Amino acid sequence: MYVIRERLFRLADDSDITDETGRPVLHVDGKILSLRNRLILRDPSGREVAQVHRKLAALRPAYQVTVDGKTMAEVRKHLFSTFHERFTIDIAGADPMEMTGDLLSHEFTIQRDGQTSATVSKRWISLTDTYAVDIAPGENDLLILASVLALDLAVDAENHHS
């Protein structure tokens, strides 16, 4: 289980990702005036391990996850879905995942081939946005955490347009 917690006083989309014991796992550095809504994921020593950024030339909201400069996945929002939000996570060299959930209840499930890969729950009580992410054994934790960050960017962009 991981916890993604945004900082209360922030100038950008900085977040900290901890494990269930509160030990830091990743720091998310949001770029303030970034046209592409870019997030840089850093390990506890400060080394960049991945990036999440919005694709500019896309018909629907789409975000790329890159590791070492190579595209690892693309997270795309479905334009039309009834009663819930749907995203597809296209993974380089692997079967895609589907992320479905409800923006009002802030509960999402990530599945591959009908099997749950992760569950995401956004907490309403805290002053900052906080997500609890429970990832199934054998899944790529970095990919799933980056996909949840892409989901948060898409939801945030949608809220700013509303």
Image (cartoon, grey):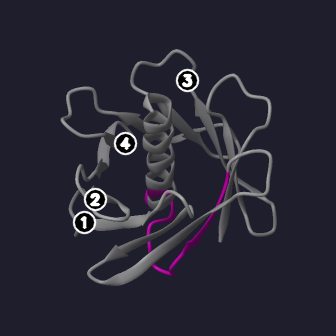
Going from N to C along the chain, the mark reached first, 4 or 1, is 4
Disc 3 element: loop
User: Mark 2: which amino acid?
Assistant: Thr
- Residue 9: x, y in percent? 79, 29
Q: Residue furthest top?
A: 33
Q: Gap in Å between the C-alphas at discs 2 and 3?
A: 25 Å
Asked if marks 1 and 3 touch (Cβ < 8 Å), the reply is: no
Q: Mark 1 or mark 2: which is in front? A: 2
**What is the crowding at mark 4: few (fewer than 14 residues within 10 Å), some, or many (at least 20)?**
some
Decide whether residue 132 is among the magenta residues. yes
Asked if marks 1 and 2 touch (Cβ < 8 Å), the reply is: yes
Residue located 49% across and 30% down the image: 160
Tag 3 residue: 31
- In the rendered view of the protein, which quadrant contains the C terminus? top left
Going from N to C along the chain, the mark reached first, 4 or 2, is 4
User: Mark 4: which amino acid?
Assistant: Thr
Q: Which mark is residue 96?
A: 1
Q: Gap in Å between the C-alphas at discs 4 and 1?
A: 16 Å
Residue located 51% across and 46% down the image: 152
Tag 2 residue: 88
Going from N to C along the chain, the mark reached first, 1 or 3, is 3
Asked if marks 3 and 4 touch (Cβ < 8 Å), the reply is: no
The residues colored magenta run: 130-143
- Residue 18: x, y in percent? 72, 57
**What is the crowding at mark 2: few (fewer than 14 residues within 10 Å), some, or many (at least 20)?**
many
Q: Mark 4 or mark 1: which is in front? A: 1
Residue located 29% across and 64% down the image: 82
Disc 1 element: loop
Q: Gap in Å between the C-alphas at discs 1 and 2?
A: 7 Å
Q: Which mark is residue 68?
A: none
